[in-house]
Image (spheres, helix red, strand yellow):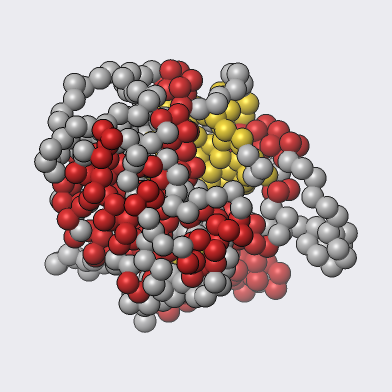
Amino acid sequence: MKQSNSWLSGLWRAADMASRSASPASADDERHAVVSNPPSPTQLTGLVAAEAKSHRRQHSDQSRFARPAKKNVRRARVVEPETDEEYTASEDWRRDCRAVAVLGQGSFGRVHLVTFQGGKFALKSVAVASLTTPKKREHARSERVALALLRGHPNILRMHAAWTAPGALHLATECAWGGELFRHLQRRKRFAAAETRFIIAELAAALVHAHKHKVAYRDVKPENVLFGGTGHVLLADFGLSKIVSIDDKDFPTKGCISLCGTPEYMAPEVLDRAPYGGSVDWWALGMLSAELLTGLPPWYTEDRVELFRRIRRAPLEPRHLVCRDPRARRDPLQRDTALLVERLLRRDATQRPSDADIKNDRYFAFCGGLEDLPSMEPPFNPSSSDADPGPAFHDRVSNERAPSRRRCAPLSEVAAVARNFEASDSVSLTADAVALDVAAAAAPPPPPPDGAPGSPGVQSPQFPGWVYP
C-alpha cells in the first residue's frame, strides 16, 4: 500500500506541477489554476513519464543498497555499497589515463603501461576490427565478465575499469611487473622443484576460485601466467573462459563442448569433441608442471597430428616427469611433483583430482592447503635485484621447505619493465588516441557478405554491458 500511495501521490504532483506552469497572477487565481488552466495531454504525459522514471530509479536503488532495518527504526536507511576500495568511474579513466609505453603487442591489439591518478596500470586495447566473428566477440565479452566476477582474488589479475572507445575496447588492470612465465621459462630453460611447487600452488588456488564461481578457464599455459611486483603469480587472459550454469557435481565433466585452447595443453576429451568441464584445467596444470621441471610439456612434437595422437594414447614416461640434470634428481620434491603430474594427467576425467582433492593434497601441505600463499615469500621473484636468468636447484635431503634466502631489494619500475617486457620507446597518448592507433594498426577484415553485421544497411555489432564499474 505504501508503494501504491507513493505512486498516486507522484501522479498528483505531476498534475499539480503542470497546472502551476501557467504562473497565476494572484492567490485566487492560484487556487483555481487547476480548473482554469488544465495541462495539455502532451504536458501531462511527459510529466507522468518523468515521475514514473524517477520513482522506478529510487525504488531500484533502495532495493539494491538498503540494509536490514534495525529495531525501533521504521524504514530502512539507504546507504552506499561497502567495498574494499573506492571505485572510479570509467569516464574518469577515459579522460585522465595516459599511455607511457607499449608492454606487448599481438594480433588482438596492444597492452600499454598507463598512468592514472598517480598510479601505474596496464591497459589492454582490443581492436574491434579484429573481432570479425561472433565467436571472437564472445571471447572478448567472456574476459570482461570473468574478470569482474573473480575480482579480488590475490592470484587473479585485478581489473579496475573497462570502457569502449572509437575502434577499440579497453580493459584497465593492475600491472604485472614480473612479466610472463613464458618469457622466464625461455630464459631459464626450467625451474627448480621448490619454485615449481610454489608457482603451481598459486595457479591451483586461482583455478579453485574460478571453479567455485563455475568458470572453466580452458587455457592454462605459460603465456597466460604473470608475476606481480612481489613475485606472486597472477592468472590472466580469460578470453577462452566459460561461465557454466550446471550443478557442482557435473561441473568437472560437463558444460563445455567447444574445441578451444592451446594444442600442447589440450585434454583428450577436448580433442575428441566430447562434453567436458572444469577438469580440463587440472590436465593443463599437469602439463605445465612437467614443463616447468623438464623444459618441455609431455609428448611434445612440432607435428600436430602426432602430438594429438600422443596426447590421446601415448604412455607417460619418466623422462616426461623428471629433469635430466643429476643435481635436480637429488631433490625429493622432483619425485613429489612427478607423482602430482601423474594424478593430474589421467585421461579419464572422472579419475582426476577434484577441487577439494587439490586443496587437501599433501603436495600443497607446505602452504596450509593453498590458504597461506598470500603471506609467504615466493622463491622466485623476477622483480627483485637477484633474479638469476639461469636454472638453480636446491640440494636437499628431506622434503622440507626451501631454506630462507636473504631479502633482496625490488627493482625500480623502469628496471622491471626493461627486464621483464619487450617495451617500446616512451609515448604519451590519451586512451582515445590509443584506441585509434590500435584500430588503425589492425588488419582490415574481409568484406562481410550481404546481410551480415557490418555490411551496408546492417548495423555493426555493439558491446552492451562492457563498461565497468
Q: Nearer the viewer, residue 288 or 149?
A: 288
Residue at the spot 42% in from the left edge and 22% down from the top edge: 416
Quarter occupied by residue 316? bottom left
- Work out whether residue 320 can be spotted: yes
- Work out whether residue 25 can be spotted: no
Vertical relation: 4 (above or below) 181: below
Query: With 291 as the anchor, is 26 left or right in this view?
Result: right
Q: Position of residue 25 (x, y in %)?
A: 62, 56
Residue at the spot 44% in from the left edge and 49% down from the top edge: 297
Residue at the spot 85% in from the left edge and 55% down from the top edge: 447
Residue at the spot 21% in from the left edge and 39% down from the top edge: 331
Q: Nearer the viewer, residue 419 or 69?
A: 419
Vertical relation: 330 (above or below) 50: above
Q: Position of residue 284 (x, y in %)?
A: 42, 56
In the image, farthest residue toward the bottom: 1
Q: Nearer the viewer, residue 17 or 358?
A: 358
